[in-house]
Image (spheres, grey):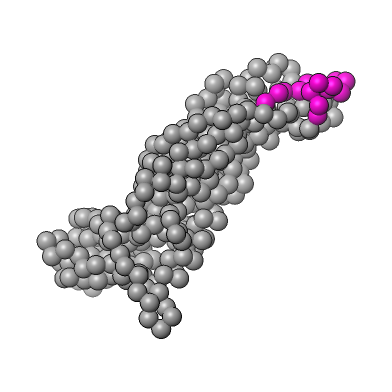
Amino acid sequence: MIGAVYSGILTPNAQPLQASCPTGNCTWPSTSTLAVCGGCLNSTYTLKECSGTACAIKPSATGPVEADCENPPNGSYCVNASTCKYILASGSEVHLMNMKAYWETPTEWWPYIGMGDLFQVAPGGGTDGAFGDSTNRMYLIRFDSIRFDLFGVPYNSVGMDDPPLSITECALWMCIQVYNTSIQASLQNQTLVSTLDYYNYTEHTQHDEDTLVFPPIPASLPGSNQTNFTMDANASNNLADYLWTILNGTVSMPGPIEYHVPLFSNDVMRSIWNATTDPQGWISNLASSMTNVVRQ
């Protein structure tokens, strides 16, 4: 599953599993399967305060140093309120560079003023977030949800004097999907017929092992066959812990912003930042890649 997660994050256009059809022309009845669903919703934030100090010394300094702006050293320029604290609707707290303070800095000092974080991906999950308190979804996280906020300057807005801040809350959860699959002339066509994602489940313990059990699929849906899908609770928790670890990081600007050379805390942050114009497409691709493993 780890390989599928990285493939879905770093590689676009995740392809569905290829069905076996020796004749090159096959049609199957509607098929239900346990799957991974994902979604992203616009959210909100509140600016709490801006504080801190960034001081540049030329020509020797290559980045910011802490200094007392009331008594700056000779040959230096200090920027007050270098970072701003934001509280996101999901409950996450993030700290980004103060873009307004940077652009008010005299241009001659731009090469020497070190930059801060422009963008942050932070685990969330509060009930006031965009997804609300969806307790009847099997989110991929222990206790609550694997929800994470994408917050900051979109990748295509870095060079603006007053770049907009965007906030998107995303989630991954287990769901049931029904597919129609056919192969004609060795070319596969697979169509998603329906998805059950608001779906209550129960937890059963037997021989000290916890199993998450979904109720039977409604008989009114194609491909139901009154199927009960299950998932090992430990596997769900381990996957959630892993996702929580990698979906957490920053994009910063270590040098002058006019150079447009961001620094990513990891490759996952690079992928997410580049996808800020279409987060739903990004999360859907990740969910599809993970679903391929679930279906095998």
Q: Position of residue 109 (x, y in %)?
A: 74, 20
Foreground of the two, 52 or 247: 52
Q: Position of residue 101 (x, y in %)?
A: 65, 22
Q: Residue furthest bottom?
A: 207
Residue 184 horizontal side relative to residue 198, left or right = left
Foreground of the two, 102 or 11: 102
Whether residue 113 is situated above or below residue 252 in the rendered picture: above
Residue 95 horizontal side relative to residue 137, left or right = right
Does residue 274 appear in this view?
no
Question: What main secondary structure does the magenta stretch of the protein show?
Answer: loop
Locate the N terminus and report the quarter of the image it occupies: bottom left
Residue 263, by quadrant, is top right
Q: Residue 161 in magenta?
A: no
Whether residue 7 is situated above or below residue 56 in the rendered picture: below
Whether residue 190 is situated above or below residue 162 in the rendered picture: below
Q: Residue 73 in magenta?
A: yes
Residue 86, by quadrant, is top right
User: Which residue appears at 25% of the width and 71% of the height?
Assistant: 228
The range drawn in magenta is 67-81
Q: Position of residue 100 (x, y in %)?
A: 60, 21
User: Which residue appears at 49% of the width and 38% of the height?
Assistant: 88
User: Which residue appears at 31% of the width and 67% of the height?
Assistant: 202
Residue 137 horizontal side relative to residue 242, left or right = left
Foreground of the two, 182 or 64: 64
User: Which residue appears at 84% of the width and 21% of the height?
Assistant: 71
Q: Position of residue 110 (x, y in %)?
A: 71, 23
Number of disc labels: 0
